[in-house]
């Protein structure tokens, strides 16, 4: 009789434990998991055009050359010297420089291996040359 009571107690305990079982998804989306980050599909390049005294140069023309297709985009720097080129291809190198009143900045390269989604490149023109 004691054996029967022990077996019934074990069976009841097992059923109770199964009733409290927590099911977690197989995909790893359980407790403590972090959502996956989506990879960007393009880059946005921005920066400022300044003189040698770090003052913004409004109206400077910023040229961006696609080194794969050799096409060139341009942008007039805003009043505060800022510029931006949105939606650039991830797998392409670019060359960028600025020009104002016949004076140019040094050209800089943005590599396709730069994994930042929003790189910043500041350009400087020496207007007193």
Image (spheres, grey):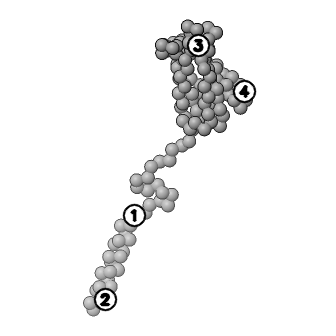
Residue 42's image quarter?
A: top right
As helix, strand or loop, the secondary structure at mark 2 comes to: helix
**Left or right of 117 on screen, residue 14:** left
Picture quarter with the N terminus? bottom left
Report the Cα–Cα distance between label 2 and label 3. 93 Å
Report the Cα–Cα distance between label 3 and label 4. 21 Å
Depth check: give the residue in front, 24 or 125. Answer: 125
| Residue furthest to the front | 129
Whole-percent x and y of residue 74?
64, 19
The nearer-to-camera label among 1 and 4 is 4
Q: Answer above or below: position of 41 versus 97.
A: below
Residue matched to label 2: 4
Whole-percent x and y of residue 72?
69, 22
As helix, strand or loop, the secondary structure at mark 1 comes to: loop
Report the Cα–Cα distance between label 2 and label 4. 87 Å
For marks 2 and 4, the one nearer the N-term is 2
Q: What number is the disc on residue 82?
A: none
Label 4 neighbourhood size at 10 Å, few (<14), some (14-19), many (20+)? Answer: few
The nearer-to-camera label among 2 and 3 is 3
Report the Cα–Cα distance between label 1 and label 3. 63 Å
Residue matched to label 1: 22
Picture quarter with the C terminus? top right
Residue matched to label 3: 60
For marks 2 and 3, the one nearer the N-term is 2
Residue positioned 66% across, 22% down in the render: 73
Residue 68's image quarter?
A: top right
Contact (CB < 8 A) between labels 1 and 3?
Answer: no
Whole-percent x and y of residue 105?
59, 17
Report the Cα–Cα distance between label 1 and label 4. 59 Å
Residue matched to label 4: 70
Q: Answer above or below: position of 14 versus 55.
A: below
């Amino acid at each position: 009789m004691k054996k029967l009571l022990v077996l019934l107690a074990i069976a009841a305990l097992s059923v109770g434990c199964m009733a409290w079982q927590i099911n977690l998804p197989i995909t790893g989306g359980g407790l403590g998991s972090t959502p996956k980050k989506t990879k960007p599909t393009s880059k946005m390049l921005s920066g400022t055009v300044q003189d040698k005294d770090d003052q913004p140069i409004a109206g400077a023309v910023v040229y961006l050359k696609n080194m794969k297709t050799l096409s060139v985009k341009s942008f007039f720097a805003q009043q505060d010297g800022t510029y931006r080129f949105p939606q650039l291809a991830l797998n392409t190198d670019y060359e960028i420089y600025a020009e104002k009143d016949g004076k140019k900045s040094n050209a800089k390269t943005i590599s396709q291996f730069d994994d930042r989604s929003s790189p910043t490149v500041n350009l400087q023109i020496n207007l007193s040359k």
